Image (cartoon, rainbow, N blue to C red):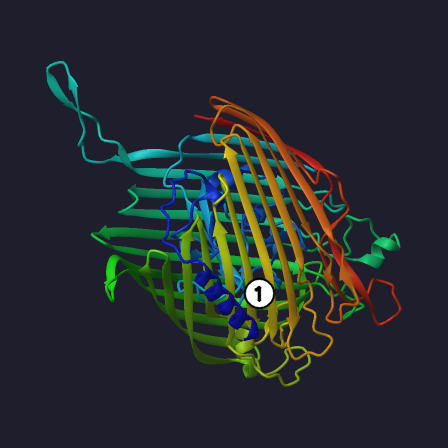
Amino acid sequence: MRLPLCLLSVAFFASALIAQDATQLPEITVTGKAEDLLGAAPAASKGQASSEELLSRPVLRRGEILETVPGLIVTQHAGGGKANQYFLRGFNLDHGTDFATSLEGMPLNMRTHAHGQGYTDLNPLLPEVIKQVDYVKGTFTAANGDLSTAGSADFTLFDSLNHNLATLEFGEHNYYRALVAGSIPIGTGKPTDTIRYGCKDQVLPPPPTAYLTYAFEYNYYDGPWDRPEAFTRGNGMLRYFDGDADDHFSLTFMGYKGRWNSSDQVAQRAIDQGVIGRYGSLDQSTGGESQRYSVNAVIQHTEGDATTKANLYAIYYDLNLFSDFTYFLDNPQHGDQFNQAEKRWVLGGQISRTWEQQKLFGKNAEFTLGLQTRHDLIDPIGLYKTENRQRLSTVRQDNVYEASVGFYADSTVHWTSWFRTNAGLRGDLFYFDTHSNLVANSGSKTEGIVSPKFSAIFGPWHEAELYLNYGMGFHSNDSRGVNNRIDPTTKEKLAPVDPLVRTQGAELGIRTQAVPHLTSALALFWLQSDSELVYVGDEGVNEPGPGSERFGIEWTNYWRPTDWFSLDGEIALTHARFTDSGKDDHIPDSVPLMISAGMNLGAQGEADGFFGSLRVRAFSKRPLIEDNSRQGKASFQVNASVGYRHQNWETALECLNVFDRKDNDIEYFYTSRLQGEQAAGYDDVHLHPTEPRMFRLRVTYKF
């Protein structure tokens, strides 16, 4: 607790130095992360990315739209429709653990997933219909519960699109994409306005209040791989929206289906020895298919100073994934390929009520009460040994019911014109029920946890605010790990993992807009976890680990001096270590340094004219094993685009990996055995290379 106490001392010392009345801030109209959040945000690391920013970024993969969150890195270790790898604040988030992602309150993370806890596949998202991304980091938000220690992001959809549009994209390595989207007005409001026409008043036709928005996408991509990826993706969305900003109802149907051949990470020695090329594969039959269908109903009602929000959702999801990471280490005859498969329903919802313009001890205050629930019905979820996608044996197969209910209370009190506090309390109750093919691994368990939150905000002074945040959080473990008693492979006895792992964090930050047109935020953070216990889906067992501690600094800057030029830059430095682990305390794949920067030029939004974008993303070397004797290579990637927009037409050319660098998306260090190797296996770096320089052309017609 030394660091949080230090942050507390610095915060109050800084506030004591500023002994003057708060100043009235001028009104600023900007977009996205440059938005004026002074007086509104509870932390320096909270922000928002607009649709304009999302669509201006040239990206290789769908998941990279999350890189609009400062300090977050998105890579891939298998290609195709498999969820991305995410890195943030010293966490190797794997495919989503400890970073909660949602779409208008509907979760995108999957608990007790066949491949990994918190698995987050963003392939079902359509960038053209996303209005904004609201993100927050740390454990300070009462509305955030499971899997949100590092942070969270919620995607919001457009109520209606300004234009109908049709888009065609073409690129190297057989990249094709077609999209059609639009909105149809299907309802009108009350006629309230009139105009004078001649000698009579004529009632104006009421504007539409209800829309049916549609979007359909087809995407195909082979990639540079010696064995074509053949990633085929289909997406569809129908959304009904009726109302305005205060009172509205929406019903959104979404569907996604994808299939692909995997480009799994490969052993470095296989490339060095000429067994395969840089884009080769050591198993010609890995790959998978997945589908997700959902319906989400959202309602909001405002009555006086009180606003009620609620949503209900239902999700059907399945995955059939074939992977091979060790080749012939465990089974020299048939190989080490394995199949992870699951089918599930996710049912849930949440409701909250916020009271504004209230009083507490005579001070202005706002209060929120919320209730959330989620139910995962997984039947079945399994791990199987396979060869050429044919099942040889069952490691384990389970039916799982996991349920949770969470209640939270949140209050903001404005004690003076320059000081306000935000306090919250969250309580969660989980139920884990597992029925396994091994009777000993069947069972049920109930566990609860309470998480307090507190933030103190000082200012604004001279167009700047100081933030002090502290909060407790948690992440759940896989239900199979919670009820494990026997290793499904060796039949050795196992100790079950803790159902809910306590985490906590603190942050000291400052946000300023003192320089005209520049928004700058600086955050010092600290995160602690009681245990890095995870369920290893690739093996079907638990891998208990020690606790961990992370601290670091993030600095973000967004400059928009004119409507035709913007510049942004982000840097994040993190120190991450296991606790009580002696000298072998480095956390594998914890990235110590990340830099991101970008520039937009020319006509922005829907303005006519030429436009361009340039983006740079770099991350440093990082430990691959606990003693730090092996490190992953640094990466430096540059993407660019240039285009022209005139009336209803728009065309753009993107160049990805401009300098054609031979970096790696991901590297691991573990033991594997190639076919024909005589030894029991070799410790080696296993990598997934970045894709080479490529060009993509996009043409859009709006109607």
Q: Report the side of 460 relative to 71 (left or right).
A: left
Task: Give the quadrant of residue 374.
Answer: bottom left
Residue drawn at point x = 21 percent, y = 27 percent? 205
Q: Report the side of 481 relative to 141 (left or right).
A: right
Q: Report the side of 471 relative to 224 (left or right).
A: left
Could you tell me the amino acid type at mark 1? Ala
Q: Quadrant of the C terminus?
A: top left
Q: Residues within 10 Å of mark 1 (few under 14, many from 20)?
A: many
Residue 478, position in %: x, y? 54, 71
The correct choice, above or below, for 456 with respect to 71 in the image is: below
Question: Residue 491 or 543: which is nearer the viewer?
Answer: 543
Secondary structure beneath disc 1?
A: loop
The reply to whether residue 45 is in sight is: no
Residue 441, position in %: x, y? 55, 80
The reply to whether residue 106 is in sight is: yes
Residue 573, position in %: x, y? 64, 58
In the picture of the structure, the residue carrying the numbered disc 1 is 114
The correct choice, above or below, for 57 with respect to 417 in the image is: above
Q: Residue furthest bottom?
A: 493
The correct choice, above or below, for 118 with respect to 614 in the image is: below
